Image (cartoon, helix red, strand yellow):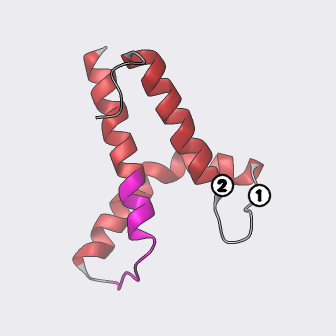
């Protein structure tokens, strides 16, 4: 149970990092490009199916928000509601 809680915490952090990096231009070959690629590989398998089901609302990717909320809810259920994120 503790390992699952830790993995969910890490995944939430990965999602936040991907969101933050999406605000900045990433040049090919830069250290940020490598980090961005890793974050993409970790998050896209869950985001892609959601993106097909949930259309974007203008410039906002709602699938990202839905995934974040799902992981947060699963974290709360698995790790106990009072434990909180991180």
Tell me if label 2 and label 1 are in contact, CB under 8 Å. yes
**Residue under pointer 1:** 55
Q: Residue at x 34, y 84 (%)?
A: 28
Nearer the observer, 83 or 15: 83
Rendered position, 38 above or below 54: below
**Is residue 57 found left or right of 84 in the rendered image?**
right
Q: Is residue 22 left or right of residue 46?
A: left
Q: Residue at x 38, y 69 (%)?
A: 21
- The answer to whether residue 54 is above or below residue 3 is below
Q: Is residue 49 magenta?
A: no
Q: Nearer the viewer, residue 21 or 37?
A: 21
Q: Which residues are magenta?
A: 16-28
The disc label shown at residue 62, or none? 2
Taking the spot 42% from the left edge, 55% from the top edge, the residue there is 41
Per the image, label 2 sits on a secondary structure element best described as: helix
Residue 12 screen position, x and y as percent: 39, 42
Is 63 positioned to the left or the right of 25 in the image?
right
Q: Is residue 49 above or below residue 36?
A: above
Residue placed at 46% from the left, 50% from the top?
43
Which quadrant holds residue 86?
A: top left
Q: CA distance from mark 2 to mark 1?
A: 7 Å
The x and y percentages for residue 40 are: 43, 59
In the image: residue 67, left or right of residue 26? right
Secondary structure, mark 1, is: loop
Figure disc tally: 2
């Amino acid at each position: 149970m503790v390992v699952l809680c830790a993995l969910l915490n890490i995944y939430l952090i990965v999602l936040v990092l991907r969101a933050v990096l999406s605000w900045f231009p990433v040049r090919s070959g830069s250290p940020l490009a490598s980090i961005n690629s890793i974050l993409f590989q970790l998050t896209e398998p869950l985001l892609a199916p959601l993106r097909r089901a949930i259309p974007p609302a203008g410039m906002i990717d709602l699938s990202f928000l839905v995934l974040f909320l799902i992981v947060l809810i699963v974290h709360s259920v698995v790790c106990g509601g009072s434990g909180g994120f991180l």
